[in-house]
């Protein structure tokens, strides 16, 4: 073995410990109850009414300052519920923007048809703002799940990699001056429902 090592360039020999010892490179991760988090008072799973009320309280504004966008007749929310539904709530003021994106509840709930699935909050970019939103997030949400370039909290972090969350994991991320909270379970349920609705037996 030693005679082969002597034949290797010095740079490769120096890098060997990192190449052949993956266990030593494993990064610590820990799961976080992301579904309990809120952004501006809004949590995933909230109804339209709950989310709107939370946004009003957080920003101290009346309901007419929260812009609502309904689904088109051809969109999934309308098809699932049988009527047009609010898909987005947006508040904007002087470069600050908060948006709540909704998915239809599966199974359909007539009294509460839509659920908050993704919440984003953004402030204007400056170097100071980038630092302040990161510090505010760390103070509010606690220790991160992985030591990524940007703070990230995962319901299910990818084990040992420090590379973020599993694809279906609820997560909260801070990137630049934007904070994003998402629970993919709502979208996944809707996609599965539509797949079932569109299932067709080939008649060949």
Image (cartoon, rainbow, N blue to C red):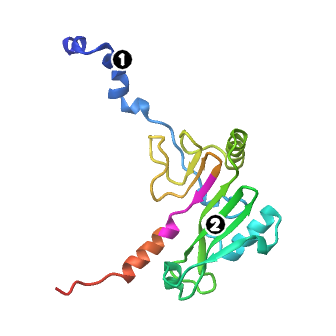
Query: Which mark, by number, is residue 166?
Result: none
The residue sitting at 68% across, 67% down in the picture is 90
Q: Residues within 10 Å of mark 1 (few under 14, many from 20)?
A: few
- Pointer 2 local density, CA inside 10 Å: few below 14, some 14–19, many at least 20: many
Judging by the rendered image, the residue that carries numbered circle 2 is: 100
The spot of residue 76 in percent (x, y) is 49, 79
Question: Which residue in the protein does label 1 denote?
Answer: 14
Which residues lie in the magenta part?
Answer: 179-187
Q: Where 173 sits versus 13, above or below? A: below
Of circles 1 and 2, the one toward us is: 2
46 or 24, which lies in front? 46
Q: How many marks?
A: 2
Please give the name of the residue rendered at 38% of the width and 77% of the height, measured from the top-left corner: 195
Q: Secondary structure at mark 1?
A: helix
Query: In this orientation, which residue lies closer to the viewer: 136 or 59?
Result: 59
Q: Residue at x 63, y 59 (%)?
A: 120
Q: Is residue 182 magenta?
A: yes
First along the sequence among labels 1 and 2? 1
The image shows residue 40, relative to residue 10, as above or below, that is below
Image vertical order of residue 64 relative to residue 34, above or below = below
Q: Is residue 4 left or right of residue 41?
A: left
Tell me how far mark 1 sits from mark 2, CA to CA: 50 Å
| Residue visible at 75% across and 67% down in the picture | 54
- Residue 22, how many percent across, how many down? 37, 32
Quadrant where the N terminus is found in the figure: top left
Q: Is residue 15 magenta?
A: no
Q: x and y percent of residue 147 in the render?
A: 54, 38
* Quadrant in which residue 134 is drawn: top right
């Amino acid at each position: 073995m030693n005679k082969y090592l002597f034949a290797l360039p010095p740079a490769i020999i120096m890098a060997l410990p990192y190449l052949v010892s993956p266990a030593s490179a494993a990064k610590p991760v820990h799961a976080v109850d992301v579904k309990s988090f809120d952004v501006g008072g809004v949590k995933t799973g909230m109804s339209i009414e709950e989310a709107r009320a939370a946004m009003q309280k957080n920003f101290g504004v009346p309901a007419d300052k929260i812009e609502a966008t309904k689904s088109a007749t051809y969109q999934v929310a309308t098809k699932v519920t049988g009527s047009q539904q609010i898909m987005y709530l947006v508040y904007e003021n002087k470069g600050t923007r908060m948006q709540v994106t909704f998915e239809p509840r599966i199974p359909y709930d007539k009294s509460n048809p839509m659920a908050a699935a993704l919440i984003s909050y953004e402030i204007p970019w400056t170097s100071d703002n980038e630092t302040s939103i990161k510090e505010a997030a760390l103070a509010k949400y606690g220790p991160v799940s992985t030591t990524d370039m940007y703070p990230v909290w995962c319901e299910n972090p990818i084990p040992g990699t420090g590379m973020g969350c599993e694809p279906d994991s609820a997560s909260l991320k801070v990137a630049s001056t934007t904070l994003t909270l998402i629970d993919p379970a709502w979208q996944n349920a809707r996609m599965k429902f539509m797949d079932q609705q569109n299932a067709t037996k080939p008649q060949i």
